[in-house]
Image: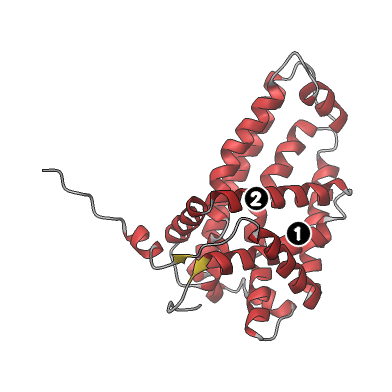
Amino acid sequence: MRRDRPDSPALIESRAFGVRNIPLLRPLGWLARGWRDLVRCPLPGLLHGLALALFGGALIALARDKFWLLSGAFTGFLLVAPVLATGLYAVSRALEKGQRADLGVAIAAWKPDRVQGGRLIIFGLLLAFAGTGWVLTSASLVTGFAPAKVNTPLDFLRVVVLNEQSHLFEIWLAMGAFLAAPVYASSVVAIPLLLDRQVSVLAAVLTSWRVVQAHPLPMALWAALLMALTVLGMATALAGLVVVAPWLAHASWHAYRDLVSTAGLEER
């Protein structure tokens, strides 16, 4: 007779965290609460957003004539951006508890004794590998299969997006979604959870997957809002990222708090 295989330790650890039920439009509430946190403690968030905007500007300056590389680099960077917002999750947590919330709190979140023995750093490196993989894949697709050279945004629009003789743009989008979907499912609540509780990386990822499986429509809406607002921030010559990036980071903390029940579990 076949015996059921025992659950892995990470899955057992993940099940210590409950998944709360939420209505479809709850992500709009996360945006409202994230905006409130940004207004209450603006300096850490605005500095974070400014750093992201400056980094984006540096990417454009370095690859201004290599849009085949720039398109992948920007989208790959978005995969890594959530872990870079760890300090802002700490600010939102402090505001939630009525504690002091300032730039020092955001910086302290990255001290060696605060990053779970390097677990947040490990998770960030995994996201960086995923982002690098997409950059290489995107560059290979565009340079290998585009019917003409793609050096500028206009070239990308003309040769890739609007080319009726090729399905390269559809393939590019599909491959990007194929990579982004599991990364999103693995990280949507995992990073705030790693900051907030004593938990392994794999258990945090499994908890994130359980959240997405339990609420596919609200989480799809949340993904769409994240993407739409990020694109809006980038479309304003990156200036909008100064506000949009920290806004979404604070909102992501509230998404975690709404979705994951940590009652009775040890805080970090």
- Residue 162 vs residue 114, the one in the foreground: 162
Separation of marks 1 and 2 at Cα, in angstroms: 18 Å
Q: Quadrant of residue 81?
A: bottom right
* Left/right of residue 217 with respect to residue 203 in the rendered view: right
* Left/right of residue 188 with respect to residue 72 in the rendered view: left
**Mark 1 or mark 2: whose residue is earlier in sequence:** 2
Q: Which type of secondary structure does the marked residue at label 2 adopt?
A: helix
Name the residue rendered at 79%, 53% in the picture: 55
Q: Label 2 neighbourhood size at 10 Å, few (<14), some (14-19), many (20+)? A: some
- Residue 121 vs residue 239, the one in the foreground: 239
Name the residue rendered at 85%, 44% in the picture: 61
Which label number is shown at residue 215? none
Does residue 164 lie above or below 59 as drawn? above
Q: Please provide percent x and percent y for residue 258.
A: 57, 67
Colour scheme in use: secondary structure
Which label number is shown at residue 245? 1
Does residue 208 lie above or below 136 as drawn? below
Q: Please provide percent x and percent y for residue 213.
A: 48, 50
Q: Label 1 neighbourhood size at 10 Å, few (<14), some (14-19), many (20+)? A: many
Name the residue rendered at 67%, 32% in the picture: 173
- Looking at numbered disc 1 in the image, what kind of residue is underneath it? Ala
Residue reaching furthest to the left: 1
Is label 1 in contact with label 2 (beta carbons under 8 Å)?
no
Q: Please provide percent x and percent y for residue 168.
A: 69, 22
Q: Which type of secondary structure does the marked residue at label 1 adopt?
A: helix
Q: Please provide percent x and percent y for residue 110.
A: 62, 71
Which label number is shown at residue 221? 2
Does residue 100 lie above or below 154 as drawn? below
* Left/right of residue 54 with respect to residue 256 in the rendered view: right
Residue reaching furthest to the top: 165
- Looking at numbered disc 2 in the image, what kind of residue is underneath it? Leu
